Image (cartoon, grey):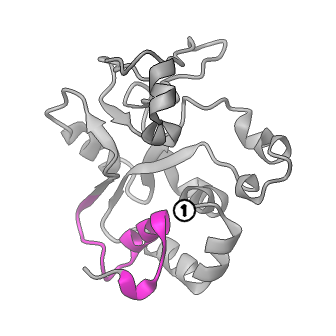
Amino acid sequence: IDITKWGYEKWWNKMLLFNPDICKEGTNIYFDLDLVFDGVQDITWMIDWIKATPDKLRCIYKYWVPIEFKKNAYYNSGWNPRFAYPTLINTSFMGWNGRSLKDMWWDFEQEADFHMTRFWGNDDYLDYFWPDRLAVLPRKVFYSYFYGAEHGSEFFDKDKEMFIKRPDYYVRLLNGRGKRIDYVEHDQLGGWRD
């Protein structure tokens, strides 16, 4: 499908997945290309989770980010517009049923240029306008190779070490600065670690 006619940049092209002319009936699953499946051979349970919430968008909750981020990011950034609508959701994985999210597409398309200027990305847009339609996958499924797996709280231990594989998780996100780490940082970290 040639998506260049819409002229969207970067992650905004993900919104096209909800366009009823592009979206297909049945269970739809999307993965960013910067994901690594570590030892997973069967993802049918993900399909079951998607089917269980027929009118929702399944996505990732960023357990590796402190919960206060959403409340404090804009202020702590010095009022940087990039952090005006912070979110704790991530759409590196998305799952949904049929054309059930076409209303998200229609809403976005009506004022696409405005939304793409107002929000840093589609994650912020979806969390701001559609929080009741989002359903996240549970802990111990996705983690960030750069940011860690769990920021921690009184209920969950911290697991913030970077650049280690976690065998008790299914999918590793290669998101954040970790994708762009340069040789100086590489040397300071003492090389890559598995």
Report whether 102 appears left or right of 111: left
Q: How many marks?
A: 1
Give above or below for 66 relative to 22. Answer: above
Q: Position of residue 21 (x, y in %)?
A: 31, 83
Viewer can see residue 136: no
Q: Is residue 27 magenta?
A: yes
Tell me the quadrant of the picture where the C terminus can be found: top left
Report whether 31 appears left or right of 105: left
Q: Position of residue 102 (x, y in %)?
A: 43, 75
Q: Position of residue 10 (x, y in %)?
A: 47, 66
Residue at 51% from the left image edge and 71% from the top image edge:
104
Query: In the image shown, does 125 or 183 lie closer to the viewer?
Result: 183
Give the extent of the magenta segment: 4-28
Tell me the quadrant of the picture where the N terminus can be found: bottom left
Q: Amino acid at mark 1?
A: Asn
Callout 1: SS: helix
Give above or below for 83 relative to 25. Answer: above
The picture quadrant where one finds residue 117 is bottom right
Give above or below for 158 relative to 9. Answer: above
Residue at 56% from the left image edge and 11% from the top image edge:
157
Query: In the image shown, does 136 or 165 lie closer to the viewer?
Result: 165
Q: Residue furthest left?
A: 41
Q: Is residue 138 magenta?
A: no
Query: In the image shown, does 20 or 111 lie closer to the viewer?
Result: 111
**Label 1: which residue?**
122
Report whether 81 appears left or right of 179: right
Q: Residues within 10 Å of mark 1 (few under 14, many from 20)?
A: many
Q: Position of residue 181 (x, y in %)?
A: 47, 36
Viewer can see residue 23: yes
The picture quadrant where one finds residue 64 is top right
Residue at 64% from the left image edge and 48% from the top image edge:
87
Give above or below for 191 relative to 98. Answer: above
